[in-house]
Image: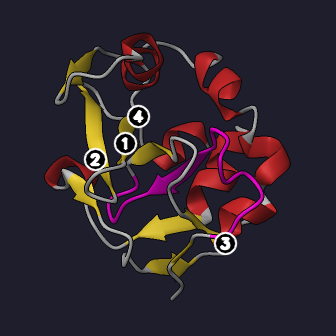
Amino acid sequence: MDGLIWDHPDKNGEFDWLAIDQINNIAIISTAGIGPVPLQSTQDREFLLGVYNQILDLPIIGEAVFIRDHGLCADWADASDRGFFCYDWDYDRELYEIISVPTNTLKAEDIFYSELYKYAKRVALSLIFKETKEIKTNIQIKKNSVA
């Protein structure tokens, strides 16, 4: 198992990474320019820099439910409308906090045909997003190799 790393190429710049939970739900997690990332995500940097556009290519399957008021609501709504849980870095508390949840969840296997599947499956978190309002920096990441 690995954890999150603080020193990465996109520190001080916006960077989003993908993860799955124990039941194959998918989340997009935003560093807000400062949060730590899984080592696997730094290796997938080129793909992940354009991940938001890949998400927009998916069909809308539900609606976003906002858990926390956030200035960039459209970005989070777009992702949750497509089944993603959305987390953003909280500067003050130094953890990832849930912003929005989907009314209908997207499972990793629902997008096995997509590049999103490959990159989401590489970061498997030992939690269930529906039950997790905060992701702390000491979270353990299961090694998951998906070609």
**Residue visible at 36% across and 17% down in the picture:** 71
**Dot 1, how many residues are within 10 Å of its Cα: few (below 14), some (14-19), or many (20+)?**
many
Q: CA distance from mark 2 to mark 4?
A: 14 Å
- First in sequence, mark 4 or 3: give its number: 3
Picture quadrant where residue 57 is located: top right
Q: Amino acid at mark 1?
A: Tyr
> Which structural element holds mark 2?
strand
Q: Amino acid at mark 2?
A: Glu
**Residue visible at 71% across and 64% down in the picture:** 8
Q: 13 or 85: which is nearer to us? A: 13
Q: CA distance from mark 4 to mark 3?
A: 21 Å
Q: Which mark is residue 84?
A: 4
Q: CA distance from mark 4 to mark 1?
A: 10 Å
Residue to which mark 2 is pinned = 97
From the top left corner, tell me how far across and down residue 36 is, in percent. 53, 63
Magenta segment main secondary structure: loop
From the top left corner, tell me how far across and down residue 80 is, in percent. 37, 25
Which stretch is magenta?
A: 7-24
Q: Are marks 2 and 1 in contact (CB under 8 Å)?
A: yes
- Mark toward the viewer: 4 or 1: 1
> Which structural element holds mark 4?
loop
- Its colouring scheme is secondary structure
Picture quadrant where residue 132 is located: bottom left
Q: Amino acid at mark 3?
A: Leu
Q: Are marks 4 and 3 in contact (CB under 8 Å)?
A: no
Q: Are marks 2 and 3 in contact (CB under 8 Å)?
A: no
